[in-house]
Image (spheres, grey):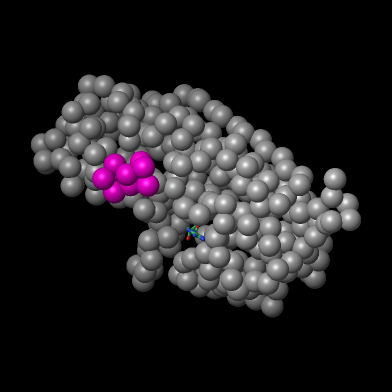
């Protein structure tokens, strides 16, 4: 499904993020659509506006925004993945939207292809978690916004519950006490690939987001933190679970098992975990933040 796709971001967004499984993709999207709609509501889009979506990925936010800015509005898709921008450009062509879309390859912390005060709205969803220079990214959002422009962000607060790979009793929300020895070996792979100390997904919380926005110059800022702990699981099929990478920089479970476990250990690991996955017998824990802010013009700042 991801053949011909080169970079790690595109591979993850278009396949490894949901185990290359269309049903799992639908489960993920069912969770994401309300998030997308909330990000866009917080942006208070008006017809005819120019919107920049930073880290547009597969266009989840940007294509819905395109409908909302109306026939005189424009949407700029930006990402560090040229493969994802090409993917979005193809989709835009299919809906005859190319004349009102732009595709810019640039990093969130260096929006160098855009001038100051050039867009009405900046949106971004689950992108800052991958950016080390988060303050610089907020500075850039502020710079490219016109006076009275709006910023609308969604980010998971991954350190709210501590690192998944440091949990001793669970593996992705499944109780794994009886196979702790095996789980520890698998988690060691993830810790090696993404050491906690240098992982930008774990180095901020919701209060930092507010601070970044204030430091950038925003004078009106709102933040909503949502924290949920519910019975259930993110997966209900073993194959989708095993072939999913938790993020674009990490191995899939199958890859980590291959690296960490002997064939006998892998069998024991799977024999224990598979029934729990199928029965969705786990705990879903997540914390996430919506931040929205206005760049008040000097005349009405207060
Ligand atoms: C989890 S995906 C989210 C995609 C999209 N925003 C959405 O709502 O579905 C993260 C996206 O951020 C992009 N990305 C990663 N680092 C970035 C950076 N430094 N600047 C801009 N985009 C980045 C990836 O290429 C990927 O498209």
Residue 16 percent across, percent down from the top left: 38, 53
Give the total of numbered labels.
Answer: 0
**Does residue 244 lie above or below 177 as drawn?**
below
Q: Is residue 137 left or right of residue 178?
A: right
Give the farthest residue toward the bottom: 99
Segment colored magenta? 190-198
Residue 126 percent across, percent down from the top left: 53, 49
Is-magenta flag for residue 208? no
User: Magenta-highlighted stretch: main secondary structure?
Assistant: helix
Q: Nearer the viewer, residue 113 or 244?
A: 113
Residue 118 percent across, percent down from the top left: 73, 69
Q: Nearer the viewer, residue 280 or 47?
A: 47
Residue 48 percent across, percent down from the top left: 81, 66
Rendered residue at 39%/26% (across/down): 282
**Does residue 173 lie above or below 126 as drawn?**
above
Q: Is residue 81 left or right of residue 60?
A: left
Q: Nearer the viewer, residue 76 or 87?
A: 76
Rendered residue at 58%/57% (across/down): 137
Asked where in the image residue 138 lies, by quadrant, the reply is bottom right
Rendered residue at 33%/47% (across/down): 194
Q: Quadrant of the C terminus?
A: top right
Q: Is residue 188 visible?
A: yes
Q: Quadrant of the N terminus?
A: bottom left
Rendered residue at 50%/25% (across/down): 230
Asked where in the image residue 241 lies, by quadrant, the reply is top left
Q: Is residue 280 visible?
A: no
Give the farthest residue toward the top: 178
């Amino acid at each position: 499904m991801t053949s011909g796709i080169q970079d790690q971001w595109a591979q993850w967004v278009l396949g490894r993020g949901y185990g290359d499984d269309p049903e799992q993709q639908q489960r993920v999207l069912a969770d994401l659509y309300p998030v997308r709609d909330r990000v866009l509501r917080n942006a208070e889009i008006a017809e005819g506006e120019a919107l920049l979506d930073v880290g547009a990925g597969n266009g989840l936010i940007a294509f819905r925004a395109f409908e909302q800015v109306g026939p005189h509005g424009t949407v700029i898709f930006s990402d560090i993945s040229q493969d994802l921008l090409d993917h979005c450009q193809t989709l835009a062509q299919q809906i005859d939207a190319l004349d009102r879309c732009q595709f810019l390859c640039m990093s969130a912390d260096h929006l160098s292809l855009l001038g100051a005060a050039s867009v009405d709205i900046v949106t971004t969803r689950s992108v800052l978690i991958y950016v080390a220079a988060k303050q610089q990214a907020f500075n850039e959002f502020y710079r490219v916004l016109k006076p009275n422009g709006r910023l609308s962000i969604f980010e998971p607060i991954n350190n709210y519950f501590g690192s998944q790979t440091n949990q001793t009793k669970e593996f992705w929300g499944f109780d794994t006490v009886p196979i702790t020895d095996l789980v520890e070996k698998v988690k060691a792979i993830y810790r090696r690939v993404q050491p906690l100390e240098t992982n930008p997904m774990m180095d901020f919380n919701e209060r930092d987001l507010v601070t970044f926005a204030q430091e950038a110059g925003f004078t009106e800022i709102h933040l909503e933190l949502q924290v949920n702990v519910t019975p259930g699981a993110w997966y209900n099929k073993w194959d989708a679970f095993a072939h999913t990478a938790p993020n674009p920089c990490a191995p899939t479970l199958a890859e980590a098992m291959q690296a960490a476990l002997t064939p006998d250990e892998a069998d024991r690991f799977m024999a224990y975990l598979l029934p729990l996955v199928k029965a969705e017998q786990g705990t879903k824990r997540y914390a996430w933040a919506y931040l929205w802010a206005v760049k008040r013009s000097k005349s009405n700042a207060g």
